[in-house]
Image (cartoon, rainbow, N blue to C red):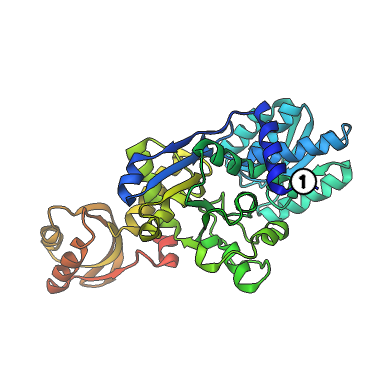
Amino acid sequence: MTSFQDRAILAERAIRAVLPPTPLQRNVHLSEKFDADIWLKREDLSPVRSYKLRGAFNAMRKVLSDDPEKGHFVCASAGNHAQGVAYMCKHFGVKGTIFMPVTTPQQKIDKTRIFGGDTIEIKLIGDYFDVTLRAAQSHCTEVNGHFLSPFDDEDVIEGQATVAVEIESQLGALPDRIVLPVGGGGLSAGTRSYFGERCAMNFVEPSGGACLFSALRAGRPVDLEQVDTFADGAAVGRIGMRTFERLKSVSLADTIQIQEDRVCITMLEMLNIEGIVLEPAGALALDALIDLKDVVKGQTVVCIASGGNFDFERLPEVKERAQRFAGLKKYFVLRMPQRPGALKEFLGILGPDDDISRFEYLKKSARNFGSVLIGLETKKAENFAVLLSKLSAAGFGYTDITDDEILAQFLI
């Protein structure tokens, strides 16, 4: 029986019929910033702007090799997996049915349709993914198709491991450390199974979707009570059984959970400085260098940039999240005295680096006072301490609602 490493190498050779190796690029900016030799594995530059087509290719290749008449593949996905499956359906000339939630952005639906052309059918079912998944699995049984899991499939795991094969070949040596994102675990299980203990690895998850961390702590895959879908490419509510079997010996100390808002800072940094467009999940490994800054110093480190399917309509949200996390933007409900000159007095309290981004009267809360929703931006986080001290001294009452999720939903 061939080893996993041998099978991954064979899969990497086979996938050359579909795509060349994605670039492994040394990043000068990050190398200087962290005093290390930082390389980026640019999966965002694949034909579908993520690594997902690798697993789809390998699984479909093997199914068709065993049964050439098996010409119908089914999947459920709202993102990169759907596009990878669609791309491969067109490549192999087989039929695909792709189930997506009704709430899927039109841009993702259109891209999936472009990749698959007339070989695929897209069905929009369910407001939530679990409803979509059940519908896809039921349909797969009805048509006697082959269901393609986005991660919990041995052939998919093997296909994702082709990323690791390329890293070793392109670098010409083993890196000291690999940093990579974790969603359902396909990429991380494949990469760890290929490299084994030959190099250090860090597994990065969004705080609102830390299914690997939760599974390691429980000793088995568990359902997360709640999932933050902002980093949708890695926001998975339960890690796969097969992927966890390959990851269960990972140390908790080698996992990193990152706040979604902090990832936004890295996304903007890479866009503004390097011109690299990354989706939130695609920026996780790069953002984790902040937590690893003392560890990676002097090391050769490969960060896997797993995807670049980013809708620029989300850019204002990304900027907002980044500013709030950095302490450069806050929202307040201000108690404004209802007297002549009060607004002018307030404006005089603002410093030269302070700017009003939003100003809205909510109501008169009392005869002599009114409530104002105000958004403020500044250039240095410490400016807010000075501003708030001046507001208190001048008799302006305020409530900071920046981190109050309930109030923010209604007011901001």
Q: Establish if 410 lies above or below 83.
A: below
Q: Determine the residue positioned at 61% across, 47% down.
A: 103
Horizontally, is 395 left or right of 202 in the view?
A: left
Under mark 1, the amino acid is Thr
Q: Determine the residue positioned at 70% across, 37% down.
A: 11
Q: Establish if 360 lies above or below 119.
A: below
Q: Is residue 412 visible?
A: no
Disc 1 marks which residue?
2
Where residue 70 sits, quadrant-wise, is top right
Task: From the top left corner, tell me how far across and down residue 233 is, in percent.
Answer: 56, 49
Q: Establish if 299 lies above or below 390.
A: above
Task: From the top left corner, tell me how far across and down residue 106 is, in percent.
Answer: 58, 38
Q: Nearer the viewer, residue 6 or 44?
A: 6
Q: Is residue 114 visible?
A: yes
Task: From the top left corner, tell me how far across and down residue 228 is, in percent.
Answer: 53, 59
Q: Nearer the viewer, residue 367 or 251?
A: 251
Task: From the top left corner, tell me how far across and down residue 400 is, in percent.
Answer: 30, 68
Horizontally, is 345 left or right of 94 in the view?
A: left
Q: Establish if 241 lies above or below 306.
A: below
Horizontally, is 84 left or right of 396 in the view?
A: right
Secondary structure of residue under mark 1: loop
Q: Bin the neighbour count of mark 1 within 10 Å (Cα to Cα): few under 14, some 14-19, many 20 and up.
A: few
Q: Quadrant of the C terminus?
A: bottom left
Q: Number of marks in the image? A: 1
Where residue 372 sits, quadrant-wise, is bottom left
Q: Nearer the viewer, residue 311 or 399?
A: 311
Q: Determine the residue positioned at 65% across, 37% down.
A: 84
